[in-house]
Image (cartoon, rainbow, N blue to C red):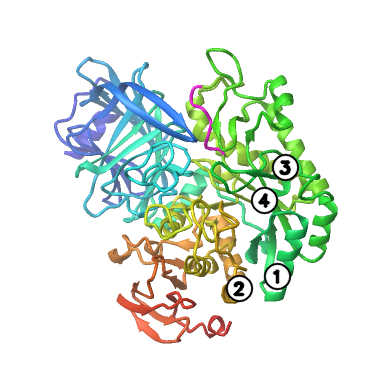
């Protein structure tokens, strides 16, 4: 029955709708099955990968909704929607030129939608086109019992999101993420600095929805058989299926499409120490670092632009691109040159806010470098971290040139070796931009524009790669201009929703989403004050993270820190030495990641994908292929269960051998977080 149907599909004469399933060869064992109900299945060597749900249809929607924004958070309230289901299969056309095919569907109104499918290497490209005038396009993905939905950017509470419904829209992470909190402050389980419409299926493929628009997903929550993906744009929707055949292969193929972050320099694998408070205080802290034998390579001086008071208290920095040479660092260039002569690298802080109380505002306003309010044509302002402010319009080439010139001065004259490229999530969705583009799409694309700008400065001034950038915000495409991402502003506590326990899932999901270079604040940022136990446990996690970095936190003067007492200082110094010992291994892993996207912090599924027990693990990970890290994430915990896959594993702190697969209970007093080495003892780490 197959051959007559294929001949019919290739004919130039009108075709009847088949009464049976059709199978179309794309290339190399890859086929698209078009079922009589219009659902499609992409198969590789007769094994199903991406599929749409049987009995469901592609849809377009017109949507009536209201949008509210506050403090970098958004609320979208749907007041009504009308859907048009393209549930009648009309035709299948095979393109004899590239072997692709076009499936045509019709709605009850007679309007048609087309699905174009083609193959290039190990990536299958889909494009769904619906009639004009629509607000959203819907793809009904099939929920297979043996599949998964890992990834979606920086997600903080688990790695497989099956059973969850949430939106993907760049925003502040939220403070506390409490279910009964305010949407404008607390956020929810899925508000994220780095959301991404991408998932990895544990069976060995990945799916990227190629859009800069808000994407709403219901992953088998409302219907156990359907994962609905709704993209809030009426333009043709494109998505790519990375065919694997393993999750690691799918991540590599993702990098081929969206790019990969730049590998950090060798000096990034020492300890990064947060230093702030002015020249005298920094000198004191550096002396403490050296006296304790902490192998620091980076001094992160975030207040090089000056100090300001945060809302509700706390130590903040001035939002500008110029040095404070009056109060904190009167001779900043000479001071930084002195620190650099002692072997340190100096990293600062920048963000894209423009503050009307500081020097950049008047120049940028006069030159049209700021977004405008559509009703009045005035500068679009919002309540930001320091009061009324705005975010630079990076669609304007003059804006980019203006900021880049200031950043060049920061490198060439002040002496910065890099920066935290903070924020980027606050772009208004209804502003008038210089390029006349859609501000809703520009909102999610902003991190790429912001990090590209800072990257261009460093590529120009330091083409040898001797520089460092770490950022928090992201969306699809930021990979091509990024370096390191940190996982956001956790609370300085052990809370499940927004404290220490959220760090590991966020690192894992970023790695699964094509960002292999990750870090985090030791020990959190918001809230507090932090405690001794929290600081020590977070330090242990930091040592087994690619980039070990401290932060004083918002409550700087109340938080427990690395130098609060002698015992904490000794604990921190020891784990900094452990991190230093891992440096050559981490740098080698980074080199691999730069060309393959393979994460350094690896979900265990990437190495042991045939072991289904690893798929749901969100609180332990592999650091490279051979170290299994199961950090202590809960207050008062001194013992935890760890899953060991099918290998021999040596407890790094005791040398005791255990064999997997199976769960083991591990004693974990402070100073001995559960860490296992595959196949060989690591007495070198134990001796530190």
Q: Which residue is mark 2?
A: 569
Q: Return the residue nearer the eye: 214 or 367.
A: 367
Type of secondary structure dominating the magenta stretch: loop
- Report if the CB atoms under discs 1 and 2 are less than 8 Å apart: yes
In magenta stretch: residue 533: no
Q: Position of residue 35 (x, y in %)?
A: 20, 36
Q: Which residue is mark 3?
A: 457
Point out the tag, 2 or 3, that comes first from the N-terminus.
Answer: 3
Q: Residues within 10 Å of mark 3 (few under 14, many from 20)?
A: some
Task: Calculate the distance from the C-alpha at mark 4 to the C-alpha at mark 3.
Answer: 19 Å
Q: Residue at the far top: name it.
A: 376
Secondary structure under the numbered disc 2 in the rendered image? helix
Q: Return the residue nearer the eye: 618 or 230.
A: 618
Q: Residue at x 53, y 34 (%)?
A: 426
Task: Calculate the distance from the C-alpha at mark 4 to the C-alpha at mark 1.
Answer: 19 Å
Secondary structure under the numbered disc 1 in the rendered image? helix
Q: Which residue is mark 1?
A: 288
Q: Which residues are magenta?
A: 424-430
Q: Residues within 10 Å of mark 4 (few under 14, many from 20)?
A: many
């Amino acid at each position: 029955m197959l051959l007559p149907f294929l001949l019919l599909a290739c004919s130039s004469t009108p075709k009847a709708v088949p009464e049976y399933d059709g199978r179309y060869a794309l290339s190399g064992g890859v086929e698209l099955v078009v079922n009589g109900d219009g659902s499609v299945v992409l198969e590789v060597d007769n094994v199903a990968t991406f599929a749409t749900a049987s009995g469901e249809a592609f849809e377009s929607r017109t949507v009536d909704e209201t949008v509210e924004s506050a403090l970098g958070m958004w609320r979208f309230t749907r007041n009504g929607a009308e859907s048009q289901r393209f549930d009648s299969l009309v035709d299948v056309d095979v393109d004899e030129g590239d072997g692709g095919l076009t499936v045509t569907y019709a709605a009850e109104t007679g309007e048609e939608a087309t699905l174009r499918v083609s193959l290039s290497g190990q990536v299958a490209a889909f494009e769904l086109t619906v009639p004009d005038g629509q607000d959203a396009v819907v793809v009904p993905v099939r929920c297979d019992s043996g599949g998964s939905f890992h990834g979606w950017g920086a997600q903080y509470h688990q790695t497989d999101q099956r059973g969850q419904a949430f939106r993907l829209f760049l925003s502040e992470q939220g403070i506390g993420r409490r279910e009964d909190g305010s949407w404008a402050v607390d956020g929810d389980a899925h508000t994220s600095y780095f959301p991404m419409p991408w998932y990895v299926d544990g069976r060995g493929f990945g799916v990227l929805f190629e859009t800069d628009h808000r994407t709403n997903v219901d992953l088998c929550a409302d219907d156990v058989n359907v994962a609905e993906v709704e993209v809030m744009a009426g333009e043709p929707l494109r998505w790519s299926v990375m065919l694997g055949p393993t999750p690691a292969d799918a991540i590599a193929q993702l990098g081929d499409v969206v790019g990969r972050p730049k590998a950090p320099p060798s000096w990034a694998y020492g300890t990064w120490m947060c230093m702030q408070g002015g020249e005298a205080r920094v000198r004191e802290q550096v002396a403490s670092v050296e006296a304790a034998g902490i192998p620091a390579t980076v001094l992160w001086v975030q207040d090089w632009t000056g100090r300001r008071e945060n809302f509700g208290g706390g130590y903040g920095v001035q939002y500008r691109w110029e040095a404070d040479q009056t109060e904190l660092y009167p001779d900043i260039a000479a001071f930084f040159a002195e620190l650099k002569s002692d072997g340190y690298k100096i990293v600062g802080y920048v963000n894209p806010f423009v503050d009307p109380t500081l020097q950049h505002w008047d120049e940028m306003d006069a030159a049209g470098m700021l977004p405008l309010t559509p009703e009045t044509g005035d500068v679009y302002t919002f309540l930001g971290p320091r009061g009324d402010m705005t975010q630079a319009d990076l669609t304007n080439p003059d804006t980019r040139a203006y900021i880049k010139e200031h950043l060049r001065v920061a490198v060439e004259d002040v002496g910065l070796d890099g920066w935290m490229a903070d924020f980027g999530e606050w772009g208004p969705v209804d502003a008038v931009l210089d390029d006349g583009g859609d501000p809703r799409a520009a909102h999610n694309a902003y991190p790429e524009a912001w990090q590209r700008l800072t990257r261009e400065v460093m590529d120009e001034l330091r083409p040898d790669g001797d520089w460092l950038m770490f950022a928090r915000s992201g969306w699809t495409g930021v990979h091509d201009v990024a370096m390191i991402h940190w996982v956001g502003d956790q609370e300085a506590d052990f809370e499940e929703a927004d404290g220490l326990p959220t760090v590991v899932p966020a690192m894992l999901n970023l790695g699964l989403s094509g960002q292999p270079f990750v870090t985090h604040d030791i020990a959190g940022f918001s809230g507090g004050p932090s405690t001794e136990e929290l600081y020590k446990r977070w330090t242990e996690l930091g040592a087994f993270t690619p980039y070990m970095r401290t932060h004083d936190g918002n409550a700087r003067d109340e938080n427990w820190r690395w130098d609060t007492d002698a015992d904490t200082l000794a604990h921190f110094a020891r784990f900094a030495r452990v991190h230093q010992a891992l440096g050559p291994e981490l740098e080698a892993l980074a080199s691999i990641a730069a060309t393959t996207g393979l994460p350094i912090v690896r979900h265990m599924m990437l190495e042991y994908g045939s072991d289904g027990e690893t798929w749901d693990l969100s609180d332990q990970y592999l650091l490279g292929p051979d170290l299994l890290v199961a950090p202590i994430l809960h207050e008062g915990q001194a013992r935890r269960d760890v899953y060991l896959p099918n290998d021999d594993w040596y407890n790094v702190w005791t040398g005791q051998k255990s064999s997997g697969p199976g769960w083991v209970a591990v004693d974990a007093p402070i100073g001995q977080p559960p860490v296992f080495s595959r196949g060989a003892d690591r007495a070198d780490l134990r001796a530190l």
